[in-house]
Amino acid sequence: MQYQRTVAERIEVKGEGIFTGKEILVEIFPAEENTGIVFVRADLKRRPKIKVEPDTIIGLEGATAVTDGTHIVYLVEHLLSAFHAMGIDNAEVRVHGEEIPIFDGSAYKWVRAIQEVGYKFCFTPKKFYRLKDEFLFKNGKGFIHFKPSDRLFVKAEILFNHPLIGHQTFEIEVTPRNYINEVCFARTFAFKDFIQEKIKQGALKGGSLENAIVLDEKGIINPDGLRCSDEFVRHKVLDVIGDLYALGIPLQAEVHACCSGHRLHIEALKTLYKEGGLEEVEAQSFTFVVIPKRAMR
Ligand SMILES: [Zn+2]
């Protein structure tokens, strides 16, 4: 039987918020079965709670957020990606600010934090969503395509007219091991002109070359270079895995995202959910075979 999991102990991390430029504390607490992932605005007096589900998630340009209509937590996607891939079903995330810190622009910090405390089981079968049918969602030149499966596969494809990027494709079966080895370290990327524009508008108060890969017309301006030549598309896979957790419970499907972003992913998931394209399944129990001790010698 695959059981639901939560973090084994409280996790505490602190880091800079890229939008506000503030130092933000995040505490992750173990949570009971069927809680799901719940964000708490711990900096506000009433400590409002926002549970991750299709009704509370919003896809923005360059970020994903959760909101109850009044309160908001920005930049939840890299933490959700780590939870989804590492099999964490239940957790309470107390955020002492309005955004999740960016760290190095990847999910590495979250993976390490989860690994350090480990996980524990909630003795209730794990739940998944499965597709009833294929589903395609298009918007301009981008699309996301879902096919039914009993596991989660994510394929991302990006196309940028830039000498370092061009056309890149990357695909994995999402398991904790594959995610840790192939995806979790891949950093987000942005173009220098775009960043300068956002700084001018006051939309980016934090951030430096420590938080993202920054590109100019010819290459990247980070002194240490790339972590791998296809780091860009690996980060896209990381983002897709995070956005898929907008459903609130893990997804089993073959997903192909092409030239897509957070807005498209979240719109697609909301539509899929509202149209009744998903069915909830419980992890099946394994058949245990008792082997007599004699036979094992
Ligand atoms: Zn990202």
Image (cartoon, rainbow, N blue to C red):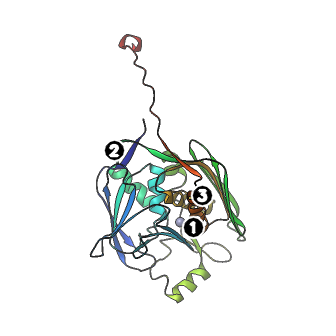
**Quadrant assignment, res 265:** bottom right
Residue 162 image point, x, y percent: 70, 71
Across and down, in percent, residue 178 comes to 53, 47
- The type of residue carrying mark 2 is Cys
Task: Determine whether the residue tagged by mark 3 lies in a helix, strand or loop.
Answer: loop
In this view, the mark in front (1 or 3)? 3
What is the quadrant of residue 74 in the picture?
bottom left
Measured as percent of width and height from the top left, residue 154 is found at 60, 52
Nearer the N terminus, badge 1 or badge 3? 1
Query: Is 185 drawn above or below residue 284 in the view shown?
Result: below
Quarter holding the N terminus is top left
**Is residue 177 placed above or below 80 in the rendered structure?**
above
Residue in the picture at 62% in, 46% down: 148
**Residue that sits furthest to the front in the current view:** 275
Dot 3 or dot 2: first in sequence order is 2
User: Residue 129 versus residue 174: which sits nearer the camera?
Assistant: 129
Is the CB atom of the residue marked by disc 3 within 8 angstroms of ligand 1's nearest atom? no
Q: Compute the Cα span from label 1 to label 3.
A: 20 Å
Measuring 44% from the left and 48% from the top, which residue is drawn there? 87
Nearer to me, 230 or 286: 286
Tag 3 residue:
275
Residue under pointer 2 = 122
Label 1 beta carbon less than 8 Å to ligand 1: yes
The residue at the point 68 percent across, 75 percent down is: 218
Q: Position of residue 258 (x, y in %)?
A: 68, 61
Q: State the mark number for residue 262.
A: 1
- The residue carrying mark 2 has its beta carbon less than 8 Å from ligand 1: no
Q: Residue furthest top?
A: 294
**Which element type, helix, strand or loop, lies under badge 1?**
helix
Mark nearest the camera among 3 and 2 is 3
Q: Earlier in the sequence, mark 2 or mark 1?
A: 2
